[in-house]
Image (cartoon, rainbow, N blue to C red):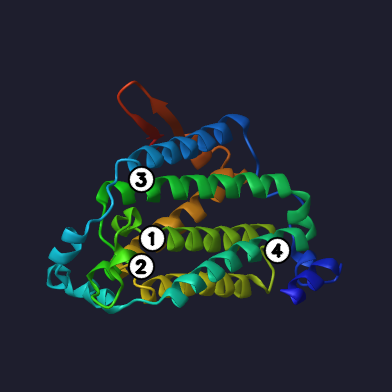
Amino acid sequence: MQSLVGLAQSPDSAINGTSLQTSPYQLSTGRDLRLLGVGAATGITSLILESQVNVVTADEVARLNRANISSFDRQATYEFSPRADRLSDVTLAGNAAMLGLITLGTKPMRQELKTVAVMYIETLLLANGVQRSVKNITQRIRPYAYNPNVPLDEKLDRSTRQSFFSGHATNAFATAVFTSEVFRHYFPQSRLKPVVWVGSLGLASATAALRYKGGEHYPSDLLAAAAFGSLIGWGIPKLHEVKNKSELGRRLDVQPWSNSLATGVYVRLEVR
């Protein structure tokens, strides 16, 4: 990363020599308020749903049988590692730190800190609001609950019902794809694009692998999270691309809604 910052500070560097003269992204008050509203609405919905999730009981744990888990996911019930669980926090933070260093270490992105920050906040709000809502609706039991070697008190918790899909992997892949896409658009000819892609996706993959080794998630949880996180990490910058001002950004209408019975999101895509 030091080499990246050093290159960014040099006028003859591989980065600044190929950066765009005009911004590839543009904020829009109406659109961004809608996106932030959707993120906030899904976040509130997830909190309401989470308050209705019951703690796993000892009787429920006693009735668990890993034979009922699909063969694709079953091996995860043999995994448990508090150390891997803690390390997944480190790799996830590393992905966010990579985005921060690239943003602050390159002049074009640093000059548009507000634009990058707003897009990233929208990405995190939407990614977390949706994945946490899904978790609290599906209430899938985590793999470690099936492992007899795991202390019972580790299993008797509300979070034990929040396996599908992984929040760590969702955030990791959303951040990785967001970072790589934004860098690609600010520096379309940079030789460092593959480095950013490999580095960010490598950290995201490590996060997912550590969540598996920790016994926190099944492979299907992680694959769903990687797909959804990547979609959000790609989609939010795409909606803000200047060249798409009259394309996807104008055709897509996203708005939160709420009444006395429910809260949700209205999405309309004009087909042409």
Q: Residue at x 17, y 69 (%)?
A: 69
Q: Disc number at residue 216?
A: 2
Position of residue 3 in the picture relative to residue 34 (left or right): right
Secondary structure of the residue carrying numbered label 3: helix
Q: Pointers 2 and 1 in contact (CB under 8 A)?
A: yes
Q: Which residue is mark 4?
A: 102
- The residue tagged 3 is 133
Disc ID at residue 228:
none
First-in-chain label (2 vs 1): 1
Q: Is residue 14 above or below residue 50?
A: below
Asked whether disc 1 touches disc 4, contact meaning CB atoms under 8 Å apart, the reply is no
Mark 3 or mark 1: name the one nearer the start of the chain. 3
Q: Nearer the viewer, mark 4 or mark 2?
A: 2
Of circles 3 and 4, the one toward us is 3
Query: What's the residue at 34%, 61% (across, down)?
Result: 224
Q: Indicate which disc, 4 or 2, sits on the residue closer to the N terminus.
A: 4
Sort mark 3 into few (<14), some (14-19) or many (20+) by Cα contacts within 10 Å: many
Residue 247 seen by the camera: no
| Quadrant including the C terminus | top left
Q: Which residue is mark 1?
A: 166
Q: Residue at x 49, y 37 (%)?
A: 40
Please indicate, yes or no, whether residue 90 appears anywhere in the rendered image: yes
CA gap, disc 4 to disc 2?
Answer: 31 Å
Label 4 sits on what residue type?
Ile
Residue 160 falls in image quadrant: bottom left
Q: Residue 180: give x, y in percent of width and height.
A: 59, 63
From the image, which quarter does the N terminus lie in?
bottom right
Left or right: where 266 falls relative to 23:
left
Q: Nearer the viewer, mark 1 or mark 4?
A: 1
First in residue order: circle 3 vs circle 4: 4
